[in-house]
Amino acid sequence: MTQQLNNNTLIAKSKSFITVILKGVGQIMLQENSITGLLFLIGIFYGSLTMGFAALLATVCGTVVAYLLKYDKAEINQGLYGFSAALVGVAVMLFLKPVFWAWVFVVIGAVVAAVLQHFFITRKIPAFTFPFVVVTWLILLICNSFFTDLLATSVPIVEHVSDALSDGFKSFGQVIFQSSLLSGILFFLAVFISSPIAALYGLAAAIISAIMAYYFSIPISEINLGLYGFNAVLCAIVFAGTQVKDGLWVLISIVFSLAISLLMLKIGIPKLTFPFVLATWITLFLKAKFQKSVG
């Protein structure tokens, strides 16, 4: 009887942990939904087995560290210590060769991302994916300075016939560094399951951002890959709502996002999701000021 109870407790704890891990992956696009996270993982594994395993390993590492450091259980259960870590894992496998030391960077980067996330959460600062950005920039700086042999060789961009809708779906894919149209559609559906309005706003924002990028003479091959829409997707998800003014805040945030992306392109810094983070911070500041002035 006691053995049976122990087994049931172990099974329940395992299910709970798996749910937390999947929610952590889902939080990449601000969705506290384990089904969303599962579909994200399937999409990543479809695009790259290596990236899939890296995302899973990093999410587990970030979550386990949160448990070990006794962070708030409710925050852990929301998956808040998994998403930046997951992005670090995928980014490492994009920028570095999949060798032993790259996996070491995945683990260390995931741990640091989780700790940084906690730093912002305890200070009630909406960090979004900023910990991922900081950690990835640091890893790239270290590798470019001391371990250039770890850097992956750039793969030439292959141009395909595309359209605005495909570009929008691919922008969803590029949030997690996936250029496959199928992965992008899967990510869109994953968000739609959790929040239909966020998914639709994200798709519209990606298309608008891609059109604006075209008029700024960004190479069409990069636009078609969704490289100038994925930050807009995240901005739209943050500000999505049922009122007209929500749409205006979405539009303001994606304009800021594209402007920051273009500036970073000139400077030569990997943009990652930093345009989304900074654009959202600016828009939240303006929104708070506006609400205060009319309230």
Image (tube, rainbow, N blue to C red):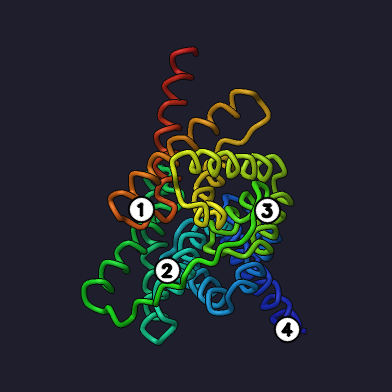
Distance from disc 4 to disc 3, alpha carbons, whole Å, reads 45 Å
- Residue 8 spot, x, y in % from top left: 73, 77
**Residue 294: horizontal and vertical position, in percent?**
49, 12
| Residue ID for mark 3 | 188
Amino acid at circle 3: Phe
Residue under numbered circle 2: 110
Disc 4 versus disc 2: nearer the observer: 2
Disc number placed over residue 119 in the picture, else none: 1
Point out which mark residue 259 bears: none
Q: Residues within 10 Å of mark 3 (few under 14, many from 20)?
A: many
Closer to the chain start, of discs 1 and 4, is 4
Residue 233 in the image: state x and y as whole percent: 56, 46
Residue at the disc numbered 4: 2
> Observer-nearest residue: 268 or 105?
268
Whole-Å distance between the Cαs marked 1 and 2? 14 Å
* Front in this rendered view, residue 231 or 121: 231
Q: Which of marks 4 and 2 is nearer the N terminus?
A: 4
Number of other residues with Cα within 10 Å of mark 4, as a class: few under 14, some 14 to 19, many 20 or more: few
SS under mark 2? helix
Q: Is mark 4 on a helix, strand or loop?
A: helix
- Disc 1 or 2, which lies upstream in sequence? 2
Q: Distance between the residues labelled 1 and 4?
A: 41 Å
Residue 226: quarter of image? bottom right
The quarter in which the N terminus is drawn is bottom right
Q: What's the amino acid at mark 2?
A: Ala
Residue mark closest to the camera, 2 vs 3: 3
When asked about the image quadrant of residue 239, the answer is top right
Q: In this view, does 178 lie to the left or right of 169?
A: left
